[in-house]
Image (cartoon, helix red, strand yellow):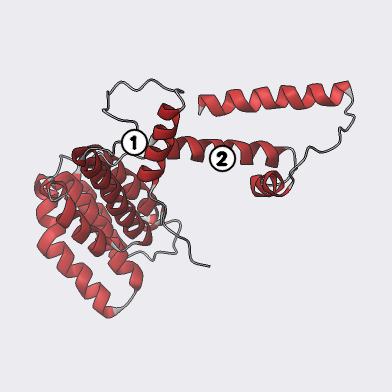
Amino acid sequence: MESTPVNWEALDSLVVDFAKSENLIEDTVSSPSPLSSPSPSSSSVSSSSYHSRLVLRKIRRCLEAGDIDSAIDLIGAHAPFILDDHRLLFRLQKQKFIELLRRGTEEARAAAIECIRTTLAPCALDAYPEAYEEFKHVLLAFIYDKDDQSSPVANQWSERRRIDISGMMSSILRAHLHAYDPVFSMTLRYLTRFVSSFFDSFAIGTHLKLLCLLILIFCDCPSIFIPFYAAFIIVTAFIKEFHHQLQI
């Protein structure tokens, strides 16, 4: 079954409009009519934010999959200023060099050498003070195998580097493109994760089972006697878990 993309911006707007109509929140912006449609400027900003988040998601997925060329193409099309920063470009090209060697073919090895000559080495000269040392260090990947955990470049071979560079680029792009998730969708994700971890910790079942029960059962279940000490343990654990989630 294919998943249907959700327009979180539109969902957030619907919830806010409902909250305003029910006087649950104060509407600071006066409108001529409760049935008036949102302004064109508001709609364009909403659409732009949603588009930016889609682009950001594509870039992140490319980086996490090791497809650096596709990520660079997307960045060049939507945020070319990123590629003007040699510090960021050097890290992207260094990861591209590793990903080319990871393929293990002669064509990929030749492409890795070309990457060094045309982009990686020039960026290393003026990216940041430690960049040239990092450049010489990453060249050891030509000598050591990716499966050698004792090699001096084992951390460069690690796929964890994909996650690191993906997170770094996502943070930078999100700030510059204002591609922040709507508050409502972030709240839903937090509550879903919180409920899931809470019920899993008590082996009660996943939150999906709980949601199915809430949807399918249309009446309250008969009361079940719970000893006082058992109820106290559950409540205490719930408070501790809630406090832990708030700290996160």
Left or right: residue 59 versus residue 1 is left
Question: What residue is shown with label 1?
Answer: 35
Dividing the picture into quarters, in which one does residue 34 lie? Answer: top left
* Closer-to-camera residue (64/133): 64
Q: Provide residue 206's location: percent of width, then percent of height.
A: 67, 47
Give the distance between the C-alpha atoms of the residues marked 1 and 2, in whole angstroms: 35 Å
Left or right: residue 66 versus residue 93 is right
* Closer-to-camera residue (27/239): 27
Q: Residue at x 44, y 62 (%)?
A: 148
Q: Provide residue 88's location: percent of width, then percent of height.
A: 20, 47
Q: Who comes first in sequence, dot 1 or dot 2?
A: 1
Label 2 crowd bin: few (<14), some (14–19), many (20+), radius 10 Å: few
Question: What residue is shown with label 2?
Answer: 193
Helix, strand or loop at disc 2?
A: helix
Q: Nearer the viewer, mark 1 or mark 2?
A: 1
Label 1 crowd bin: few (<14), some (14–19), many (20+), radius 10 Å: few
Q: Is residue 74 above or below residue 42?
A: below
Name the amino acid, label 2: Arg
Helix, strand or loop at disc 1?
A: loop
Task: Say if residue 136 shows up in the picture.
Answer: no
Q: Provide residue 193's location: percent of width, then percent of height.
A: 56, 40
Q: Residue at x 44, y 40 (%)?
A: 185
